[in-house]
Each structure stands twice: as structure tokens, then as C-alpha cells.
Image: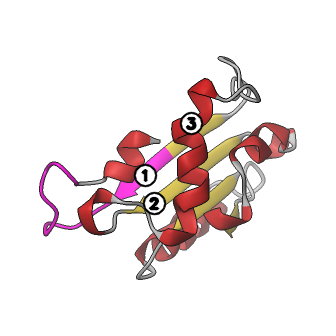
């Protein structure tokens, strides 16, 4: 299991670590989560992960005006462009279980709340 995070203030990283600790404690022997920052990965890296990392969780924060954190910008852009990128086909991640968890605050309007997660 791979747990990725993208954050500005640290909350997504904190939740990624807490979720991983919970999984280790309650599912030891089944899952051994690896926690990494999202900026260490390109979208195409997900398809090349070993089978024991087929479950991928992405915790991503929301910044002003519904933008992703700076550390997620490249990955975010790749997900948005993947439908027209020749490297990615319709079944590009068919062997992966990718879960995106968006974080946002009450200060964001409905228009911008968790926009990066929704758009991924």
C-alpha cells in the first residue's frame, strides 16, 4: 500500500501518517503502508509499482482559489492531461486501486472546496 500526500501546512501529511499507523496496527501482515510526498511521483509511476503497492491513497489539501499545493502541481497537471496524453490509455491504472482524499476548510466556498481532489 502506498500513501501519498500533498500539503502546504502539513495537515495532509499528518492524516496520511495517522491513516498508515491505523492500517499497520489493525492490518499487520496484510498491509505495510509506505508514506511518501506526492512530488516524488509522476502519474506514470503508479502503473509501474510492484503488486504489493496496488492500493494507492492520495491525501491532497486545497489551497486558495481551489488550487493544489505546490508540491502536487506536476502530478495534478498530469492527471488533468492524461485523457489526451498518448502515454496513458483508457485502462492505464486498471490494476491499481487509487483513492483520493481531499482536504479543505470551511473558509473555502463550495466552488473551491476540495477542488484538487475532485479534479484528480
Q: CA distance from mark 3 to mark 2?
A: 18 Å
User: Is residue 7 or residue 64 the one in the foreground?
Assistant: 64
Q: Position of residue 52 (x, y in %)?
A: 82, 44
Q: Is residue 56 left or right of residue 118?
A: right
Residue denoted by label 2: 60
- Relative vertical location of residue 78 with respect to residue 22 in this rendering, above or below: above
User: Is residue 67 or residue 8 the one in the foreground?
Assistant: 67
Q: Are marks 1 and 2 in contact (CB under 8 Å)?
A: yes
Q: Nearer the viewer, mark 1 or mark 2?
A: 2
What's drawn in magenta, residue-wise?
100-112
Residue 81's tag is 3
Q: Is residue 113 left or right of residue 50?
A: left
Q: Are marks 3 and 2 in contact (CB under 8 Å)?
A: no
Q: Position of residue 31 (x, y in %)?
A: 72, 52
Tell me which label, 3 or 1, sits earlier in the chain.
3
Q: Nearer the viewer, mark 3 or mark 2?
A: 3
Q: Specify whether residue 57 is painted magenta.
A: no
Amino acid at each position: 500500500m502506498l500513501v501519498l500526500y500533498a500539503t502546504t501546512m502539513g495537515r495532509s501529511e499528518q492524516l496520511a501518517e495517522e491513516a498508515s499507523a491505523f492500517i499497520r496496527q489493525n492490518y499487520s501482515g496484510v498491509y505495510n503502508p509506505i508514506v511518501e510526498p506526492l512530488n516524488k511521483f509522476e502519474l506514470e509511476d503508479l502503473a509501474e509499482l510492484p503488486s504489493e503497492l496496488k492500493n494507492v491513497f492520495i491525501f491532497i489539501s486545497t489551497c486558495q482559489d481551489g488550487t493544489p499545493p505546490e508540491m502536487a502541481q506536476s502530478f495534478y497537471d498530469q492527471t488533468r492531461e492524461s485523457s489526451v496524453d498518448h502515454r496513458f490509455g483508457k485502462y492505464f491504472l486498471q490494476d491499481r486501486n487509487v483513492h483520493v482524499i481531499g482536504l479543505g476548510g470551511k473558509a473555502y466556498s463550495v466552488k473551491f472546496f476540495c477542488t484538487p481532489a475532485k479534479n484528480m
